[in-house]
Image (cartoon, rainbow, N blue to C red):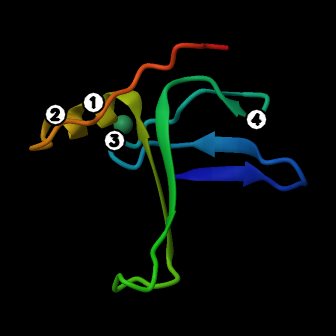
Amino acid sequence: MKKYIKGKEKKLQYVKCNMCGKELEINKGILTEGALLIDYEWNYFSNKDGEIHSLDLCEECYDNLIKNLKIPVDIEKRTELM
Ligand SMILES: [Zn+2]
């Protein structure tokens, strides 16, 4: 779960991993460690039409989660890193 600081810019106040509850590192409103932040709006074809689901996973929980997938995650390496 995450909370933004109120204002025009989307600055994070905190992010906690939904799986393990760990609070992730934030510096000046920016997440400074690996995490998967999900905000997903379910559509008409689901039973959750119009609901936006938000959840966040720390990198460790993400790694544990994907270990259990029958089909592995597609990983593409970007050639240019900023
Ligand atoms: Zn976690």
Query: Quick check: marks 3 and 2 in contact, CB under 8 Å?
Result: no
Q: CA distance from mark 3 to mark 2?
A: 16 Å
Q: CA distance from mark 2 to mark 1?
A: 6 Å
Disc 4 designates what residue?
29
Question: Is the C-beta of the residue carrying label 3 under 8 Å from the nearest atom of ligand 1?
Answer: yes
Q: Is residue 42 above or below residue 72?
A: below
* Mark in the foreground, 4 or 1: 1
* Mark in the foreground, 3 or 2: 2
How many residues crowd mark 1 within 10 Å: few (<14), some (14–19), many (20+)?
few
Query: Quick check: marks 2 and 1 in contact, CB under 8 Å?
Result: yes
- Residue 59 locus on image (x, y percent): 39, 29
Name the residue: 49% across, 26% down. 34
Q: Amino acid at mark 4?
A: Gly
Q: Amino acid at mark 2?
A: Lys
Element type where label 1 sits in the image:
helix
Q: Amino acid at mark 1?
A: Asp
Question: Is the C-beta of the residue carrying label 1 under 8 Å from the nearest atom of ligand 1?
Answer: no
Element type where label 4 sits in the image:
loop
Disc 3 designates what residue?
20
* Mark in the foreground, 4 or 3: 4
Q: CA distance from mark 4 to mark 3?
A: 22 Å
The first of marks 1 and 3 along the sequence is: 3
User: In the drawing, does residue 60 fall left or right of residue 13?
Assistant: left
Tag shown at residue 63: 1
Query: Quick check: marks 2 and 4 in contact, CB under 8 Å?
Result: no
Q: Amino acid at mark 3?
A: Cys
- Residue 26 locus on image (x, y percent): 66, 29
Name the residue: 22% across, 33% down. 64
- Residue 45 locus on image (x, y percent): 37, 84
User: In the drawing, does residue 25 fall left or right of residue 10?
Assistant: left
Tag shown at residue 67: 2
User: In the drawing, does residue 53 fall left or right of residue 2?
Assistant: left
